């Protein structure tokens, strides 16, 4: 029966060959002409041209204020994303961070206000060929040059250590490759002794930025904290300041800020016979006048470039995330090309019991050396501490080889002033000089900031005032130089 149905079905199907015969002797152009398509196209073209003639040129432009706002928003957002790229991909490519969009929006808004002020107050107009894409190339090129110079072996073999540490600066990166400066904040605490035991076992050194009253009171005679403090100093570890009560230095006035430092100095000085010259601000917040005040009190302000985020993973299983961050950083390049200042906390149990031995073992296996911050910065021994009697006097600033650069900059400024006195008919600067000026200003901007962590990533400290505004101002300065 099935066979019969199949045979019957096949009989009912009629196959037809497609009709492949088409118009012969005519081309598509001829057929289009017969149907009048050319005339219809011409009519449509004439209609569009007539409509265009009826539109006034002024109607095609936005109001100047709207154009200015849109232009500024474009630059602000472009620079915001650029800065985030520099921060994560260049310096923190090993960590998984989330963009804090609220901060990006705030910075963009600040940039908009600054740009609007410049446009309205001093009537600056952007007339150069500096586009966001070109600025991106300049910034990346400048950063590459800075990193290449800072990692050059000649920069360490033929330069005295006193020339390495600068003043007026927040230190976030080691200057000597192949070193890892483990730093511990917020202690001493009940887990600090265990960390010291591990450091002794691996013959490693570290830096402890201590508080006077945080998890416990440093000068409490019923506790062992003073003994731990003495052990740190006697073992060759660096003792640094983290303020007395972990106060946010940017939220208190100058006298209170000074008391936060001096009160800790007194206790530390009584315990180890000397006072620190290195300070890590709580939460990483200290810039502008805060850094100036700390330096006037004899401190170098130190931050970090590798955050283990151990404060987020203080659990037996979760601490593996901090291990992964640290391991990925060390594996991102050879010791001859990189070094790190690592942020940890000796008040966390998992840091003391699991993370510290892992890091010390990883440092050893990867060919790095665990040192103090002062060593990774190449700072000479006389700058590591101050006598107790000298607490009210700042450390003598390190002499650098920047005098020639300053003289050159002064000469350049004088030349620029002379050029400003010329009439408008003066010959324009060569294109190569214009490009050099743009490159110089961007490079100087990166040199002044000294880091890339500026607040667009969670738990990263915000440095200085709005750096997006700084970028816009630098672009404006470069415009002035190019068109002076």
Image: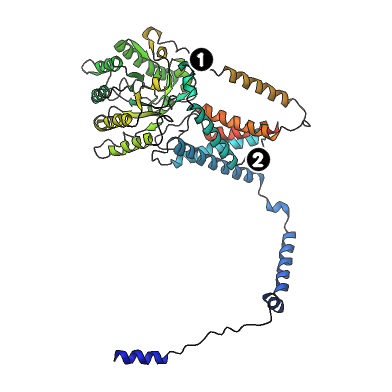
**Image point (29%, 14%), residue name:** 234
Q: Is residue 190 left or right of residue 156?
A: left
Depth check: give the residue in front, 274 or 120.
Answer: 274
Q: Of the residues tagged 1 and 2, which is closer to the observer?
A: 1
Q: Residue furthest left?
A: 222
**Where residue 399 is drawn, which disc sits there?**
1
Depth check: give the residue in front, 101 or 147.
Answer: 147
Q: The C terminus appears in which quarter of the rendering? A: top right
**Image point (69%, 82%), residue name:** 25
Which residue is label 2 attached to?
Answer: 129
Q: Does residue 252 appear in the picture of this structure?
A: no
Image vertical order of residue 183 relative to residue 81, above or below: above
Check disc 2: other Cα within 10 Å, few if <14, some if 14-19, many if 20+.
few
Q: Is residue 297 left or right of residue 51?
A: left
Q: Position of residue 414 (x, y in %)?
A: 68, 21
Q: Position of residue 364 (x, y in %)?
A: 31, 29
Q: Position of residue 109 (x, y in %)?
A: 53, 39
Element under disc 1: loop
Element under disc 2: loop
Check disc 1: other Cα within 10 Å, few if <14, some if 14-19, many if 20+.
some
Q: Is residue 354 left or right of residue 276?
A: left
Image vertical order of residue 301 relative to residue 389, above or below: below
The Cα–Cα distance between marks 1 and 2, rounded to whole angstroms, is 39 Å
């Amino acid at each position: 029966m099935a066979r019969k149905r199949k045979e019957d079905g096949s009989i009912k199907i009629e196959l037809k060959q497609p009709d492949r015969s088409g118009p012969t002797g005519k081309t598509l152009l001829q057929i289009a002409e017969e149907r009048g398509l050319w005339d219809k196209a011409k009519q449509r073209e004439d209609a569009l041209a007539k409509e265009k003639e009826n539109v006034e040129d002024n109607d095609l432009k936005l109001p100047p204020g709207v154009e200015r706002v849109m232009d500024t928003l474009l630059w602000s957002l472009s620079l915001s994303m650029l800065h985030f790229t520099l921060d994560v991909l260049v310096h923190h490519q090993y960590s998984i961070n989330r963009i804090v969009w609220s901060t990006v929006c705030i910075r963009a808004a600040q940039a908009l206000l600054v740009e609007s002020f410049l446009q309205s107050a001093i009537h600056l107009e952007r007339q150069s060929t500096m586009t966001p894409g070109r600025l991106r190339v300049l910034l990346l090129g400048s950063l590459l040059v800075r990193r290449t110079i800072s990692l050059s072996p000649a920069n360490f073999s033929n330069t005295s250590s006193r020339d390495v540490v600068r003043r007026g600066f927040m230190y976030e990166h080691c200057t000597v490759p192949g070193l890892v400066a483990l730093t511990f904040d917020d202690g001493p605490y009940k887990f600090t002794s265990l960390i010291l035991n591990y450091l002794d076992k691996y013959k490693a050194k570290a830096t402890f930025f201590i508080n006077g009253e945080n998890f416990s009171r440093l000068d409490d005679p019923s506790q062992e904290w003073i003994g731990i403090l003495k052990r740190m100093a006697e073992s060759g570890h660096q003792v640094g300041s983290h303020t007395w009560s972990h106060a946010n230095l940017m939220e208190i006035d100058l006298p209170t800020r000074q008391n936060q430092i001096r009160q800790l100095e007194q206790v530390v000085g009584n315990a180890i016979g000397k006072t620190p010259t290195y300070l890590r601000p709580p939460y990483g917040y200290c810039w502008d006048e805060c850094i100036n005040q700390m330096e006037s009190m004899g401190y170098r302000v130190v931050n970090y470039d590798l955050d283990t985020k151990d404060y987020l993973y203080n659990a037996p299983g979760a601490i593996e995330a901090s291990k992964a961050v640290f391991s990925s950083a060390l594996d991102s390049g050879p010791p001859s090309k990189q070094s790190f200042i690592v942020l940890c906390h000796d008040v966390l149990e998992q840091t003391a019991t699991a993370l510290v031995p892992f890091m010390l073992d990883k440092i050893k296996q990867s060919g790095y050396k665990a040192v103090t911050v002062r060593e990774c910065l190449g700072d000479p021994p006389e700058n590591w501490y101050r006598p107790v009697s000298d607490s009210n006097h700042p450390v003598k600033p390190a002499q650098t080889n920047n005098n020639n650069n300053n003289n050159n900059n002064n000469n350049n400024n004088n030349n620029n002033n002379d050029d400003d006195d010329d009439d408008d008919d003066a010959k324009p600067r060569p294109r190569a000089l214009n490009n050099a000026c743009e490159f110089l200003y961007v490079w100087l901007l990166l040199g002044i900031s000294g880091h890339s962590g500026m607040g667009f990533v969670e738990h990263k400290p915000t440095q200085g005032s709005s750096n997006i505004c700084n970028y816009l101002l630098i672009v404006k300065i470069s415009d002035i130089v190019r068109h002076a």
